[in-house]
Amino acid sequence: MTSSNNLYINLGGESALIKDKEPILATIYRAAAAAGLNPVDITDPFSMVRGFGNLQNFILERPGKWIINDSISLHLFPDGFPFPHIQISRDYEWACTVPGLRCIGVHTQSMLESPQGAIELLASLHSKPIEPIDGFRSIHVVNEFAPSDNETICRNALAAVSWGKVGLLDIHYKFVFFEQQSVPYVWDIFSQIDEFAEDGDLCIFTNRDICLVPEATAIIRSFMTNHGLKTAYASRVDILNFETADHKDLFGEKHYGGIDLFCWIKGNLPNVSPVHKQLVVGYESWDAVFRILFGGSNHKIPYNICYHYAHEPKWQTKEGADGNYHNKLLSSLVNQNIPVTISDNGIPYYESDRF
């Protein structure tokens, strides 16, 4: 193979904080083989070179694609790495440097270790240089309500603890509550947080009891950047204990069929009709409709970044009948795949404060 077909790998440097290189290397080798590239691990030879100038020359003498940690980009080539490269970030959001010139992908360490790691890395190896999303802040809005039973209180408390752990890794992350006396319209929540956000902010919506893994914001922004997306969504994993989880704890777990997290970059909400604006949170079908509005299957985040304690939701009980009917009726007007049976009493219209 010619040098231009080489994939140079450097996982070294204490500042990169890569504790276990083996699973990351295994992912890289699988992706390189599928891409027809020759992987060359230069971590040890690179560590023997002294002096910034010598380190720069070491790299410049090796044309090809590279996989490097974020500290190399920052310290050796602050104006842009000289060759197409994939940047390995820490598991918190681009703590060292935003991907620069000739970067064709950015992947966190846990992304590369995950079951989806090789497939996503392969996609990046075939990519053109990415356009990093400006901004660092992440604003997470949740629908607040006052629970009346112990189980719901515990689920909500677990979620809040998990958000706190996100904030320990990502100092630019904050969560806020959307408070309303009645069940809110989905669009009211989305539009108000988008108006509140600043340019470049990553806006995230979940229900009150949805937990996030600590690496969530870094994974979301990296995935969206790699695929050139401004909107995305994710499904949750159900757990059976009241313990917070890291991304690695959820590797290989099955996704729930519905959508529990929607995210977008400030100013990029989809265009919606008056019908869409009447869908309410917490009942059937609204997430299926917004899944399409947010881009469909190509916008689904494949990593397990959110989870919650498994329970019987209100919409599956008799209490949810009116809200379900309201949402399904409106959804059928914009999506013929969501059928609704009209009762003999005609087509009722429910205000959200009736649920």
Image (spheres, rainbow, N blue to C red):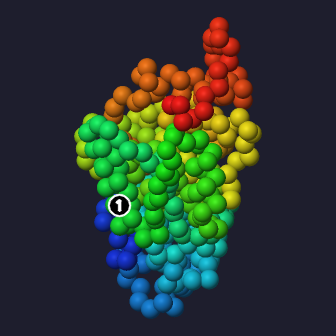
Q: Using residue 213 as the reference point, say whether residue 181 is left or right of it.
A: right
How many numbered marks are there? 1
Residue 112: horizontal and vertical position, in percent? 44, 55
Q: Above or below — where is 288 with respect to 30?
A: above
Residue sitting farthest toward the top: 344
Percent coordinates x, y for residue 121 in the rendering: 53, 53
Q: Secondary structure at mark 1?
A: helix
Q: Is residue 306 above or below residue 344?
A: below
Residue 215: tell me if it is visible: yes
Amino acid type indicated by mark 1? Gly
Q: Quarter-wise, where is residue 325 in the image?
A: top right
Residue 182 appears left or right of 25: right
Q: Which residue: 34% across, 60% down? A: 165
Q: Would you say 187 lies left or right of 182 here? A: right
Q: Is residue 4 left or right of residue 273?
A: left
Q: Answer above or below: position of 204 versus 42.
A: above
Give x and y (percent) for residue 29.
45, 54
**Residue 101 x, y percent position in the rendering:** 64, 73
Where the N terminus falls, by quadrant? bottom right
Look at 34% across and 77% down and name the residue there.
14
Rendered image quadrant of residue 331: top right
Q: Residue at x 41, y 85 (%)?
A: 49
The residue indicated by pointer 1 is 164
Q: Of residues 247 and 196, which is closer to you in this image?
A: 196
Task: Identify which residue, 133 or 101, lies in the foreground.
Answer: 133
